[in-house]
Amino acid sequence: MGNTQTAPAPAPAAAGSAPSGELKPTGSLDIKDSRTDKTYSVQIVQGGVEGDTATRAMDLRQIKTAPDEFGLMTYDPAFMNTASCKSAITFIDGDKGILRYRGYPIEQLAEKATFLEVAWLLRHGELPAQGEYDQWVRDITFHTYVHENIKTFLQGFRYDAHPMSMLCSTVAALSSFYPEAKNIHDPEQRNISIIRLLAKLPTLAAFCYRHIKGLPFIYPDNDLSYVENFLSMVARMSEPKYEANPVFVKALEILFILHADHEQNCSTNAVRAVGSSQVDPFSAIAAGVAALYGPLHGGANEQVLRMINEIGHPKNVPAFIDEVKGGKGGRLMGFGHRVYKSYDPRAKIVKALADEVFKQVGMDKDLEIALKLEDAALHDDYFVSRKLYPNVDFYTGLIYRSMAFPTDFFTVLFAVARTAGWLAQWEELLLDKEQKIARPRQIYVGYGDRPYQSKLAQRFPTLKKDALRK
Ligand code: ACO
Protein backbone atom coordinates (compact mmCIF):
# COMPACT_ATOMS: atom_id res chain seq x y z
CA MET A 1 0.00 0.00 0.00
CA GLY A 2 2.84 2.38 0.71
CA ASN A 3 3.99 2.75 -2.88
CA THR A 4 3.17 6.19 -4.22
CA GLN A 5 4.75 5.64 -7.67
CA THR A 6 1.75 6.65 -9.71
CA ALA A 7 1.56 8.64 -12.89
CA PRO A 8 2.10 12.35 -12.34
CA ALA A 9 -1.10 14.04 -11.25
CA PRO A 10 -2.92 15.22 -14.36
CA ALA A 11 -4.16 18.78 -14.08
CA PRO A 12 -7.68 18.56 -12.66
CA ALA A 13 -10.41 20.50 -14.38
CA ALA A 14 -10.48 23.96 -12.89
CA ALA A 15 -13.46 24.56 -10.66
CA GLY A 16 -16.09 26.33 -12.66
CA SER A 17 -14.46 25.60 -16.02
CA ALA A 18 -16.35 26.54 -19.18
CA PRO A 19 -19.10 26.45 -20.19
CA SER A 20 -21.02 26.61 -16.94
CA GLY A 21 -18.48 27.93 -14.43
CA GLU A 22 -18.80 31.66 -14.87
CA LEU A 23 -21.50 33.50 -12.99
CA LYS A 24 -22.66 36.11 -15.49
CA PRO A 25 -24.84 39.06 -14.46
CA THR A 26 -28.11 38.85 -16.37
CA GLY A 27 -30.07 41.64 -14.72
CA SER A 28 -30.87 43.14 -11.37
CA LEU A 29 -33.58 42.92 -8.78
CA ASP A 30 -34.90 46.02 -7.03
CA ILE A 31 -35.91 45.49 -3.43
CA LYS A 32 -37.77 48.16 -1.50
CA ASP A 33 -37.36 48.09 2.28
CA SER A 34 -40.68 49.23 3.79
CA ARG A 35 -38.90 50.06 7.06
CA THR A 36 -36.76 52.77 5.49
CA ASP A 37 -38.43 53.34 2.09
CA LYS A 38 -34.98 52.77 0.55
CA THR A 39 -34.64 50.77 -2.68
CA TYR A 40 -31.68 48.41 -3.20
CA SER A 41 -30.53 46.84 -6.41
CA VAL A 42 -29.09 43.33 -6.19
CA GLN A 43 -27.51 41.54 -9.14
CA ILE A 44 -29.11 38.55 -10.78
CA VAL A 45 -26.43 36.07 -11.90
CA GLN A 46 -26.64 32.95 -14.01
CA GLY A 47 -24.24 30.04 -14.25
CA GLY A 48 -23.68 28.82 -17.81
CA VAL A 49 -25.96 27.54 -20.54
CA GLU A 50 -28.59 25.89 -18.37
CA GLY A 51 -27.51 27.42 -15.06
CA ASP A 52 -29.96 28.56 -12.46
CA THR A 53 -30.42 32.24 -11.79
CA ALA A 54 -29.57 33.52 -8.32
CA THR A 55 -28.57 36.54 -6.29
CA ARG A 56 -25.57 36.61 -4.01
CA ALA A 57 -26.89 36.24 -0.47
CA MET A 58 -24.13 38.58 0.81
CA ASP A 59 -25.68 41.46 -1.21
CA LEU A 60 -28.64 41.37 1.17
CA ARG A 61 -26.34 42.50 3.98
CA GLN A 62 -26.48 46.04 2.57
CA ILE A 63 -30.16 46.17 3.52
CA LYS A 64 -30.31 47.61 7.01
CA THR A 65 -32.11 50.28 9.02
CA ALA A 66 -28.96 51.70 10.66
CA PRO A 67 -25.28 51.64 9.61
CA ASP A 68 -24.19 49.51 12.58
CA GLU A 69 -26.88 46.87 11.98
CA PHE A 70 -25.95 43.39 10.70
CA GLY A 71 -28.20 43.63 7.62
CA LEU A 72 -30.56 41.05 6.18
CA MET A 73 -29.75 37.39 5.71
CA THR A 74 -31.77 34.52 4.26
CA TYR A 75 -33.44 31.79 6.34
CA ASP A 76 -33.39 28.46 4.54
CA PRO A 77 -33.63 25.35 6.75
CA ALA A 78 -32.50 22.22 4.86
CA PHE A 79 -31.10 24.38 2.01
CA MET A 80 -34.37 24.19 0.09
CA ASN A 81 -33.41 27.15 -2.10
CA THR A 82 -29.75 27.94 -1.48
CA ALA A 83 -26.83 27.24 -3.82
CA SER A 84 -23.75 26.54 -1.68
CA CYS A 85 -21.29 26.35 -4.56
CA LYS A 86 -20.72 26.64 -8.29
CA SER A 87 -20.14 23.24 -9.79
CA ALA A 88 -19.36 22.01 -13.29
CA ILE A 89 -19.71 18.30 -12.43
CA THR A 90 -23.35 17.17 -12.47
CA PHE A 91 -26.43 18.75 -14.01
CA ILE A 92 -29.95 17.85 -12.89
CA ASP A 93 -33.23 19.20 -14.19
CA GLY A 94 -35.63 17.78 -11.63
CA ASP A 95 -38.79 18.80 -13.48
CA LYS A 96 -37.75 17.25 -16.76
CA GLY A 97 -36.02 14.20 -15.20
CA ILE A 98 -32.58 15.00 -16.71
CA LEU A 99 -29.26 13.89 -15.19
CA ARG A 100 -25.90 14.51 -16.85
CA TYR A 101 -22.31 14.07 -15.67
CA ARG A 102 -20.08 16.76 -17.20
CA GLY A 103 -22.71 17.22 -19.93
CA TYR A 104 -23.05 13.53 -20.85
CA PRO A 105 -26.58 12.07 -20.39
CA ILE A 106 -26.72 9.38 -17.71
CA GLU A 107 -28.53 7.03 -20.10
CA GLN A 108 -25.55 7.09 -22.54
CA LEU A 109 -22.96 6.66 -19.80
CA ALA A 110 -24.89 3.74 -18.27
CA GLU A 111 -25.12 2.05 -21.66
CA LYS A 112 -21.60 2.63 -22.96
CA ALA A 113 -19.08 3.69 -20.29
CA THR A 114 -17.17 1.86 -17.55
CA PHE A 115 -17.34 2.95 -13.92
CA LEU A 116 -13.66 3.94 -13.78
CA GLU A 117 -14.07 5.94 -17.01
CA VAL A 118 -16.95 7.79 -15.32
CA ALA A 119 -14.86 8.32 -12.17
CA TRP A 120 -12.17 9.94 -14.35
CA LEU A 121 -14.78 12.02 -16.19
CA LEU A 122 -16.30 13.30 -12.94
CA ARG A 123 -12.90 14.36 -11.68
CA HIS A 124 -11.30 15.76 -14.81
CA GLY A 125 -14.26 17.06 -16.78
CA GLU A 126 -13.44 15.14 -19.98
CA LEU A 127 -13.54 11.49 -21.00
CA PRO A 128 -10.11 9.88 -20.65
CA ALA A 129 -7.99 9.17 -23.74
CA GLN A 130 -6.86 5.51 -23.98
CA GLY A 131 -3.44 6.21 -22.41
CA GLU A 132 -4.96 8.21 -19.54
CA TYR A 133 -7.54 5.50 -18.92
CA ASP A 134 -4.98 2.68 -18.92
CA GLN A 135 -2.78 4.53 -16.42
CA TRP A 136 -5.80 5.39 -14.23
CA VAL A 137 -6.93 1.75 -14.14
CA ARG A 138 -3.35 0.59 -13.43
CA ASP A 139 -2.95 3.09 -10.58
CA ILE A 140 -6.27 2.16 -8.98
CA THR A 141 -5.61 -1.57 -9.38
CA PHE A 142 -2.14 -1.16 -7.83
CA HIS A 143 -3.57 0.42 -4.66
CA THR A 144 -6.36 -2.04 -3.84
CA TYR A 145 -4.54 -3.67 -0.91
CA VAL A 146 -5.04 -2.31 2.63
CA HIS A 147 -2.66 -2.40 5.59
CA GLU A 148 -2.92 -5.69 7.51
CA ASN A 149 -3.87 -3.75 10.67
CA ILE A 150 -7.21 -2.90 9.03
CA LYS A 151 -8.10 -6.59 9.31
CA THR A 152 -7.35 -6.59 13.04
CA PHE A 153 -9.35 -3.41 13.39
CA LEU A 154 -12.37 -4.94 11.60
CA GLN A 155 -12.19 -8.03 13.77
CA GLY A 156 -13.01 -5.80 16.76
CA PHE A 157 -16.55 -5.33 15.45
CA ARG A 158 -19.33 -7.62 16.64
CA TYR A 159 -20.65 -10.18 14.15
CA ASP A 160 -23.92 -8.22 13.84
CA ALA A 161 -22.36 -4.74 13.37
CA HIS A 162 -24.02 -2.77 10.58
CA PRO A 163 -21.60 -2.74 7.61
CA MET A 164 -22.10 1.02 7.14
CA SER A 165 -20.80 1.64 10.69
CA MET A 166 -17.83 -0.57 9.88
CA LEU A 167 -17.20 1.12 6.54
CA CYS A 168 -17.48 4.62 7.99
CA SER A 169 -14.97 3.81 10.74
CA THR A 170 -12.47 2.05 8.48
CA VAL A 171 -12.51 4.85 5.88
CA ALA A 172 -11.87 7.36 8.71
CA ALA A 173 -9.13 5.07 10.07
CA LEU A 174 -7.30 5.13 6.70
CA SER A 175 -6.47 8.76 7.49
CA SER A 176 -4.15 7.54 10.26
CA PHE A 177 -2.27 5.27 7.79
CA TYR A 178 -1.57 8.16 5.40
CA PRO A 179 -0.70 11.22 7.52
CA GLU A 180 0.77 12.95 4.43
CA ALA A 181 -2.77 13.06 2.96
CA LYS A 182 -3.41 16.16 5.03
CA ASN A 183 -1.27 18.12 2.54
CA ILE A 184 -4.38 18.76 0.50
CA HIS A 185 -2.91 21.72 -1.39
CA ASP A 186 -0.20 19.49 -2.89
CA PRO A 187 -1.60 18.14 -6.21
CA GLU A 188 0.52 14.95 -5.92
CA GLN A 189 -0.89 14.20 -2.49
CA ARG A 190 -4.43 14.88 -3.65
CA ASN A 191 -3.90 12.58 -6.61
CA ILE A 192 -2.58 9.64 -4.59
CA SER A 193 -5.30 10.05 -1.94
CA ILE A 194 -8.00 10.02 -4.62
CA ILE A 195 -6.48 6.89 -6.19
CA ARG A 196 -6.18 5.21 -2.79
CA LEU A 197 -9.78 5.94 -1.84
CA LEU A 198 -11.18 4.67 -5.15
CA ALA A 199 -8.93 1.61 -4.96
CA LYS A 200 -9.50 0.66 -1.33
CA LEU A 201 -13.23 1.30 -0.92
CA PRO A 202 -14.21 -2.02 -2.61
CA THR A 203 -11.63 -3.85 -0.47
CA LEU A 204 -12.96 -2.32 2.76
CA ALA A 205 -16.57 -2.94 1.69
CA ALA A 206 -15.83 -6.59 0.87
CA PHE A 207 -13.93 -7.08 4.15
CA CYS A 208 -16.98 -5.72 6.06
CA TYR A 209 -19.13 -8.30 4.26
CA ARG A 210 -16.76 -11.18 5.02
CA HIS A 211 -16.59 -10.18 8.69
CA ILE A 212 -20.39 -10.21 9.07
CA LYS A 213 -20.55 -13.59 7.38
CA GLY A 214 -17.70 -14.97 9.50
CA LEU A 215 -15.71 -15.75 6.36
CA PRO A 216 -11.97 -15.26 5.82
CA PHE A 217 -10.97 -12.03 4.11
CA ILE A 218 -10.15 -12.44 0.41
CA TYR A 219 -7.30 -10.31 -0.89
CA PRO A 220 -7.71 -8.27 -4.09
CA ASP A 221 -7.06 -10.04 -7.38
CA ASN A 222 -5.37 -7.44 -9.51
CA ASP A 223 -5.91 -9.42 -12.73
CA LEU A 224 -9.61 -8.65 -12.53
CA SER A 225 -11.59 -5.54 -13.44
CA TYR A 226 -12.78 -3.16 -10.68
CA VAL A 227 -16.23 -4.77 -10.39
CA GLU A 228 -15.04 -8.37 -10.92
CA ASN A 229 -12.39 -7.93 -8.25
CA PHE A 230 -14.99 -6.55 -5.84
CA LEU A 231 -17.28 -9.55 -6.47
CA SER A 232 -14.31 -11.87 -6.05
CA MET A 233 -13.44 -10.35 -2.65
CA VAL A 234 -17.10 -10.71 -1.62
CA ALA A 235 -17.91 -14.19 -2.90
CA ARG A 236 -14.76 -16.26 -3.56
CA MET A 237 -14.45 -19.44 -1.55
CA SER A 238 -11.96 -22.22 -2.27
CA GLU A 239 -11.72 -21.77 -6.04
CA PRO A 240 -8.27 -20.50 -7.14
CA LYS A 241 -9.76 -17.91 -9.51
CA TYR A 242 -13.17 -16.32 -9.10
CA GLU A 243 -15.33 -16.15 -12.19
CA ALA A 244 -18.16 -13.70 -11.70
CA ASN A 245 -21.51 -14.05 -13.42
CA PRO A 246 -21.21 -11.63 -16.40
CA VAL A 247 -24.83 -10.46 -15.92
CA PHE A 248 -24.01 -9.44 -12.34
CA VAL A 249 -20.77 -7.73 -13.44
CA LYS A 250 -22.64 -5.69 -16.03
CA ALA A 251 -25.47 -4.87 -13.60
CA LEU A 252 -23.08 -3.72 -10.87
CA GLU A 253 -21.01 -1.65 -13.33
CA ILE A 254 -24.21 0.14 -14.42
CA LEU A 255 -25.47 0.61 -10.86
CA PHE A 256 -22.09 2.05 -9.85
CA ILE A 257 -22.30 4.53 -12.77
CA LEU A 258 -25.85 5.55 -11.80
CA HIS A 259 -24.80 6.15 -8.19
CA ALA A 260 -21.47 7.84 -8.92
CA ASP A 261 -22.62 11.44 -8.37
CA HIS A 262 -25.75 13.45 -7.79
CA GLU A 263 -24.61 17.04 -7.21
CA GLN A 264 -25.28 18.63 -3.80
CA ASN A 265 -27.16 15.84 -2.02
CA CYS A 266 -26.95 15.27 1.74
CA SER A 267 -23.75 13.18 1.72
CA THR A 268 -21.94 15.34 -0.87
CA ASN A 269 -22.85 18.39 1.16
CA ALA A 270 -21.39 16.62 4.21
CA VAL A 271 -18.14 15.85 2.33
CA ARG A 272 -17.89 19.47 1.16
CA ALA A 273 -18.73 20.92 4.61
CA VAL A 274 -16.20 18.71 6.40
CA GLY A 275 -13.66 19.12 3.57
CA SER A 276 -13.98 22.92 3.82
CA SER A 277 -12.21 22.71 7.20
CA GLN A 278 -9.21 21.50 5.12
CA VAL A 279 -9.12 18.11 6.81
CA ASP A 280 -7.63 15.16 4.87
CA PRO A 281 -9.88 13.47 2.25
CA PHE A 282 -10.19 10.17 4.17
CA SER A 283 -11.90 12.03 7.04
CA ALA A 284 -14.08 14.04 4.64
CA ILE A 285 -15.20 10.90 2.75
CA ALA A 286 -15.98 9.16 6.08
CA ALA A 287 -18.41 12.04 6.75
CA GLY A 288 -20.05 11.29 3.40
CA VAL A 289 -20.42 7.60 4.33
CA ALA A 290 -22.07 8.62 7.64
CA ALA A 291 -24.55 10.90 5.87
CA LEU A 292 -25.34 8.26 3.26
CA TYR A 293 -26.21 5.74 5.99
CA GLY A 294 -29.41 7.64 6.93
CA PRO A 295 -32.77 6.12 5.87
CA LEU A 296 -33.86 9.31 4.09
CA HIS A 297 -30.74 9.16 1.89
CA GLY A 298 -28.71 6.11 0.81
CA GLY A 299 -30.23 3.97 3.54
CA ALA A 300 -33.54 4.11 1.65
CA ASN A 301 -32.67 1.09 -0.58
CA GLU A 302 -32.43 -1.05 2.56
CA GLN A 303 -35.69 0.40 3.89
CA VAL A 304 -37.51 -0.35 0.61
CA LEU A 305 -36.89 -4.07 1.05
CA ARG A 306 -37.87 -3.99 4.72
CA MET A 307 -41.09 -2.19 3.73
CA ILE A 308 -41.83 -4.75 0.98
CA ASN A 309 -41.21 -7.58 3.47
CA GLU A 310 -43.67 -5.99 5.88
CA ILE A 311 -46.33 -5.64 3.17
CA GLY A 312 -45.83 -9.36 2.54
CA HIS A 313 -48.32 -9.88 -0.30
CA PRO A 314 -49.57 -7.87 -3.32
CA LYS A 315 -53.10 -7.98 -1.89
CA ASN A 316 -51.92 -5.87 1.09
CA VAL A 317 -50.70 -3.00 -1.10
CA PRO A 318 -53.91 -0.88 -1.12
CA ALA A 319 -54.15 -1.02 2.70
CA PHE A 320 -50.48 -0.06 3.00
CA ILE A 321 -50.92 2.90 0.64
CA ASP A 322 -53.89 4.06 2.75
CA GLU A 323 -51.75 3.85 5.89
CA VAL A 324 -49.00 5.96 4.29
CA LYS A 325 -51.58 8.54 3.19
CA GLY A 326 -53.10 8.57 6.65
CA GLY A 327 -49.67 9.21 8.15
CA LYS A 328 -49.63 5.84 10.00
CA GLY A 329 -47.44 3.67 7.77
CA GLY A 330 -44.44 6.00 7.62
CA ARG A 331 -43.28 7.07 4.17
CA LEU A 332 -43.39 5.08 0.99
CA MET A 333 -39.66 4.33 0.90
CA GLY A 334 -38.00 4.68 -2.52
CA PHE A 335 -40.51 7.36 -3.48
CA GLY A 336 -40.03 11.11 -3.62
CA HIS A 337 -36.95 13.21 -4.10
CA ARG A 338 -35.88 16.69 -3.08
CA VAL A 339 -34.89 17.57 -6.64
CA TYR A 340 -36.78 15.26 -9.01
CA LYS A 341 -40.39 16.22 -9.37
CA SER A 342 -40.86 13.70 -12.17
CA TYR A 343 -39.62 10.12 -12.73
CA ASP A 344 -35.99 9.82 -11.55
CA PRO A 345 -34.09 9.02 -14.80
CA ARG A 346 -31.93 6.54 -12.88
CA ALA A 347 -35.02 4.64 -11.70
CA LYS A 348 -36.03 4.00 -15.35
CA ILE A 349 -32.62 2.48 -16.09
CA VAL A 350 -32.68 0.41 -12.88
CA LYS A 351 -36.13 -0.96 -13.68
CA ALA A 352 -34.95 -2.14 -17.12
CA LEU A 353 -31.80 -3.58 -15.55
CA ALA A 354 -33.88 -5.49 -12.99
CA ASP A 355 -35.68 -7.24 -15.89
CA GLU A 356 -32.31 -8.35 -17.33
CA VAL A 357 -31.04 -9.66 -13.99
CA PHE A 358 -34.30 -11.48 -13.21
CA LYS A 359 -34.14 -13.18 -16.62
CA GLN A 360 -30.86 -14.69 -15.44
CA VAL A 361 -31.68 -15.59 -11.84
CA GLY A 362 -35.46 -15.91 -11.95
CA MET A 363 -38.12 -13.45 -10.91
CA ASP A 364 -37.76 -11.88 -7.46
CA LYS A 365 -40.64 -13.05 -5.31
CA ASP A 366 -41.39 -9.49 -4.23
CA LEU A 367 -41.26 -7.84 -7.65
CA GLU A 368 -45.04 -8.12 -7.91
CA ILE A 369 -45.44 -6.14 -4.66
CA ALA A 370 -43.01 -3.48 -5.93
CA LEU A 371 -44.80 -3.17 -9.29
CA LYS A 372 -48.19 -2.97 -7.59
CA LEU A 373 -46.91 -0.31 -5.15
CA GLU A 374 -45.50 1.73 -8.01
CA ASP A 375 -48.70 1.44 -10.02
CA ALA A 376 -50.90 2.34 -7.04
CA ALA A 377 -48.77 5.38 -6.17
CA LEU A 378 -48.53 6.65 -9.75
CA HIS A 379 -52.33 6.66 -9.96
CA ASP A 380 -53.10 8.04 -6.52
CA ASP A 381 -53.81 11.74 -6.12
CA TYR A 382 -51.83 11.93 -2.83
CA PHE A 383 -48.59 10.96 -4.62
CA VAL A 384 -49.40 12.63 -7.96
CA SER A 385 -50.23 16.01 -6.40
CA ARG A 386 -46.99 15.94 -4.38
CA LYS A 387 -45.01 14.85 -7.44
CA LEU A 388 -43.74 11.72 -5.68
CA TYR A 389 -42.23 9.28 -8.18
CA PRO A 390 -39.97 6.24 -7.71
CA ASN A 391 -36.37 7.26 -7.03
CA VAL A 392 -33.18 5.31 -7.78
CA ASP A 393 -33.54 3.25 -4.63
CA PHE A 394 -36.95 1.75 -5.36
CA TYR A 395 -35.71 -1.14 -7.52
CA THR A 396 -32.00 -1.36 -6.65
CA GLY A 397 -32.69 -3.41 -3.51
CA LEU A 398 -34.47 -6.11 -5.50
CA ILE A 399 -31.48 -6.38 -7.86
CA TYR A 400 -28.97 -6.50 -5.00
CA ARG A 401 -31.02 -9.19 -3.26
CA SER A 402 -31.14 -11.31 -6.40
CA MET A 403 -27.33 -11.08 -6.43
CA ALA A 404 -27.43 -12.49 -2.86
CA PHE A 405 -26.23 -9.33 -1.10
CA PRO A 406 -27.71 -9.06 2.43
CA THR A 407 -30.14 -6.17 2.93
CA ASP A 408 -27.94 -4.15 5.25
CA PHE A 409 -25.12 -4.26 2.68
CA PHE A 410 -27.07 -2.33 0.01
CA THR A 411 -26.00 1.12 1.19
CA VAL A 412 -22.37 -0.03 1.26
CA LEU A 413 -22.62 -0.69 -2.50
CA PHE A 414 -23.96 2.82 -2.94
CA ALA A 415 -21.04 4.24 -0.91
CA VAL A 416 -18.43 2.46 -3.04
CA ALA A 417 -19.88 4.08 -6.17
CA ARG A 418 -20.56 7.51 -4.67
CA THR A 419 -16.92 7.81 -3.55
CA ALA A 420 -16.12 8.78 -7.17
CA GLY A 421 -18.51 11.75 -6.99
CA TRP A 422 -17.52 12.75 -3.45
CA LEU A 423 -13.87 12.93 -4.48
CA ALA A 424 -14.58 14.99 -7.61
CA GLN A 425 -16.72 17.38 -5.54
CA TRP A 426 -14.09 17.56 -2.79
CA GLU A 427 -11.35 18.50 -5.25
CA GLU A 428 -13.60 21.02 -7.00
CA LEU A 429 -14.25 22.64 -3.61
CA LEU A 430 -10.52 22.88 -2.84
CA LEU A 431 -9.75 24.51 -6.19
CA ASP A 432 -12.64 26.98 -5.96
CA LYS A 433 -11.19 30.30 -4.84
CA GLU A 434 -14.57 31.52 -3.62
CA GLN A 435 -14.95 28.71 -1.08
CA LYS A 436 -14.13 29.13 2.59
CA ILE A 437 -14.87 27.06 5.67
CA ALA A 438 -18.60 26.20 5.63
CA ARG A 439 -20.21 28.04 8.46
CA PRO A 440 -23.92 28.83 8.18
CA ARG A 441 -25.65 31.56 10.15
CA GLN A 442 -28.55 31.00 12.52
CA ILE A 443 -31.56 32.95 13.66
CA TYR A 444 -31.31 32.92 17.41
CA VAL A 445 -34.69 32.33 19.07
CA GLY A 446 -33.56 31.56 22.63
CA TYR A 447 -33.45 33.56 25.88
CA GLY A 448 -32.06 37.07 26.13
CA ASP A 449 -29.36 37.94 28.67
CA ARG A 450 -30.10 36.49 32.15
CA PRO A 451 -27.99 36.13 35.28
CA TYR A 452 -26.68 32.73 36.38
CA GLN A 453 -28.51 31.35 39.43
CA SER A 454 -27.49 27.82 40.31
CA LYS A 455 -30.12 25.18 41.10
CA LEU A 456 -27.48 22.88 42.65
CA ALA A 457 -26.96 22.51 46.41
CA GLN A 458 -23.17 22.58 46.10
CA ARG A 459 -20.80 23.71 43.31
CA PHE A 460 -18.40 20.73 43.35
CA PRO A 461 -20.26 17.95 45.22
CA THR A 462 -17.99 15.12 46.34
CA LEU A 463 -19.25 11.76 45.16
CA LYS A 464 -19.95 9.43 48.08
CA LYS A 465 -18.39 5.98 47.57
CA ASP A 466 -21.76 4.23 48.07
CA ALA A 467 -23.43 6.31 45.36
CA LEU A 468 -21.72 4.28 42.63
CA ARG A 469 -23.03 1.03 44.07
CA LYS A 470 -26.70 2.06 44.07
N1 ACO B 1 -44.09 8.81 1.06
C1 ACO B 1 -45.18 9.52 1.45
N2 ACO B 1 -45.22 10.86 1.49
C2 ACO B 1 -44.12 11.52 1.12
C3 ACO B 1 -42.95 10.86 0.70
C4 ACO B 1 -42.96 9.46 0.67
N3 ACO B 1 -41.89 8.75 0.28
N4 ACO B 1 -42.01 11.77 0.40
C5 ACO B 1 -42.56 12.96 0.62
N5 ACO B 1 -43.84 12.82 1.04
C6 ACO B 1 -44.81 13.88 1.32
C7 ACO B 1 -44.52 14.58 2.63
O1 ACO B 1 -45.20 14.00 3.71
C8 ACO B 1 -45.01 15.98 2.32
O2 ACO B 1 -46.42 15.99 2.38
P1 ACO B 1 -47.21 17.27 2.98
O3 ACO B 1 -46.94 18.38 2.01
O4 ACO B 1 -48.61 16.83 3.05
O5 ACO B 1 -46.59 17.54 4.33
C9 ACO B 1 -44.63 16.18 0.87
O6 ACO B 1 -44.64 14.86 0.30
C10 ACO B 1 -43.27 16.82 0.66
O7 ACO B 1 -42.32 16.08 1.41
P2 ACO B 1 -40.99 16.68 1.98
O8 ACO B 1 -40.55 15.86 3.15
O9 ACO B 1 -41.16 18.16 2.20
O10 ACO B 1 -40.02 16.48 0.75
P3 ACO B 1 -38.45 16.57 0.80
O11 ACO B 1 -38.03 17.10 -0.51
O12 ACO B 1 -37.98 17.28 2.02
O13 ACO B 1 -38.02 15.04 0.99
C11 ACO B 1 -37.26 12.86 0.57
C12 ACO B 1 -37.41 14.28 0.02
C13 ACO B 1 -36.47 12.91 1.90
C14 ACO B 1 -36.47 12.00 -0.41
C15 ACO B 1 -38.69 12.26 0.81
O14 ACO B 1 -39.41 12.23 -0.41
C16 ACO B 1 -38.63 10.88 1.46
O15 ACO B 1 -38.55 10.81 2.69
N6 ACO B 1 -38.68 9.78 0.64
C17 ACO B 1 -38.59 8.44 1.19
C18 ACO B 1 -37.11 8.11 1.48
C19 ACO B 1 -36.33 7.85 0.21
O16 ACO B 1 -36.74 7.10 -0.67
N7 ACO B 1 -35.13 8.46 0.17
C20 ACO B 1 -34.20 8.26 -0.94
C21 ACO B 1 -34.02 9.51 -1.74
S1 ACO B 1 -32.96 9.22 -3.12
C22 ACO B 1 -31.43 9.20 -2.43
O17 ACO B 1 -31.14 9.83 -1.44
C23 ACO B 1 -30.43 8.43 -3.10
Image (tube, grey):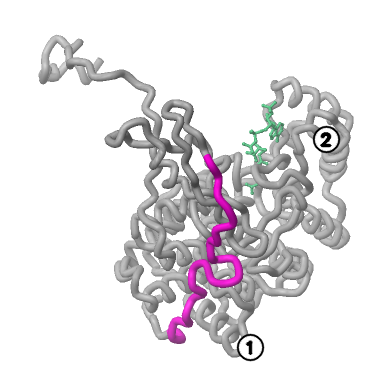
Q: Residue at x 44, y 49 (%)?
A: 157
- Is residue 357 left or right of 422 when viewed as pictured? right
Residue 3 sits above or below residue 452 on the image: below
Instruction: Answer yes or no: disc 2 within 8 Å of ligand 1.
Output: no
Kind of residue sitting beneath label 1: Gln
Query: Which numbered circle lies on residue 249?
Result: none
Provide residue 239's location: percent of width, then percent of height. Answer: 65, 73
User: What residue is disc 1 on?
Assistant: 130
- Is residue 329 left or right of 280 when viewed as pictured? right
Earlier-in-chain disc, 2 versus 1: 1
Question: Does residue 202 appear in this view?
Answer: no
Kind of residue sitting beneath label 2: Ala
Q: Residue at x 64, y 51 (%)?
A: 410
Q: Quadrant of residue 215?
A: bottom right
Magenta-tinted stretch: 6-30
The kind of secondary structure element at disc 2 is helix
Residue 89 sits above or below residue 81 on the image: below
Task: Please name whichever residue, 151 or 250, is drawn nearer the observer in this view of the structure.
Answer: 250
Provide residue 191's location: percent of width, then percent of height. Answer: 43, 75
Task: Please name whichever residue, 306 or 118, is drawn nearer the observer in this view of the structure.
Answer: 118
Task: Please name whichever residue, 196 or 264, is drawn nearer the observer in this view of the structure.
Answer: 264
Q: Are marks 2 and 1 in contact (CB under 8 Å)?
A: no
User: What residue is disc 2 on?
Assistant: 377
For ligand 1, give the image quadrant: top right
